[in-house]
Amino acid sequence: MSDLYDKLFEDVRFREGLKACLNCGTCTAICPAAEFYDYQPRRILDILQTRDQSQIEELLKSNTIWYCGECMSCVTRCPRGNAPGLLIQALRSLSQELGYFTESEKGRQQLAIKRTIGKWILEYGYCLYPSEILPDMHPEQGPVWEWEHKNMEAVMNRLGANYKGTGGGILRKIPEEALGEIRRIFEVTGGLSRMEKIEEFSRKKAAEMGMEMNDGKNDDYMKFIYTENSGDHTRKNED
């Protein structure tokens, strides 16, 4: 395999995001994710500047690159014009491209995002679609959501939404022509092929772990990645 740093450098986000880090730590100080997670943008830049193959591979397989919220607070504060948020985007993209994302708990959740938000955008034109947020997959929503889910149309009508209706209004049905444009955007930008790779690598990981994986949301592997929580992600209190 060619050098991982060279692969990252092919990504314009990487070339624009990494200049010369002086290790001041300003990005970590301002980072909302660093306050809660075991995550330091400064450390990411430190590793990338070494161009060390093994350390970069470890990053690509880690939970670390999935903690960033891509708020870009780091960009506005860096005295050298670095953009750790863009570097994270490049790292995530390469991790998906090579299948390394399946090696970490947070990385494996890419399949869940693909099968929920990704699917809903392509099928409905919405990032979130109420009827698809199943109560058994979201027990934290409690019995109120279970009732609302069963009475979705009545609830939406009372709230003034044009749920699945034609014309204007919240949660209206998006015309097929518009959905077709969205799908074409995903196709020409590589989004669809990336989704296929997420499925492909996830299927290999499921087989490796001896778990069932089909095309839905209720197979063993999907349930596992949806609920898996090692509890090791939050930053340890050093006081």
Image (cartoon, rainbow, N blue to C red):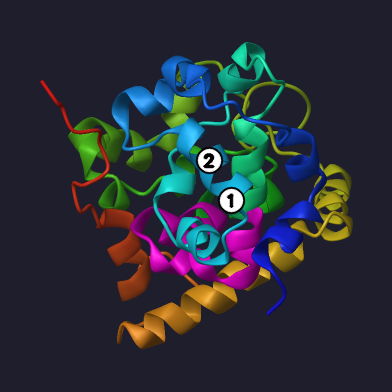
Q: Is residue 165 above or below residue 139?
A: above
Name the quadrant containing residue 49. top right
Q: Which residue is mark 2?
A: 46
Residue 50's disc is 1
- The x and y percentages for residue 220 are 30, 74
- Residue at 75 percent across and 39 percent down: it is 174
Residue 185 appears left or right of 8 = right
Within-10-Å neighbours for mark 1: few <14, some 14–19, many 20+? few
Residue type at mark 2: give it.
Asp
Pick whichever, 94 or 28, lies toward us: 28
- Residue at 39 percent across and 80 percent down: it is 206
Secondary structure under badge 1?
A: helix
- Label count reads 2
Secondary structure under badge 2?
A: helix
Q: Is residue 25 above or below residue 127?
A: above
Q: Is residue 84 above or below residue 221?
A: above
Residues under numbered marks 1 and 2 in contact, where contact means CB atoms less than 8 Å apart: yes
- Residue extent of the magenta highlight: 93-115
Within-10-Å neighbours for mark 2: few <14, some 14–19, many 20+? some
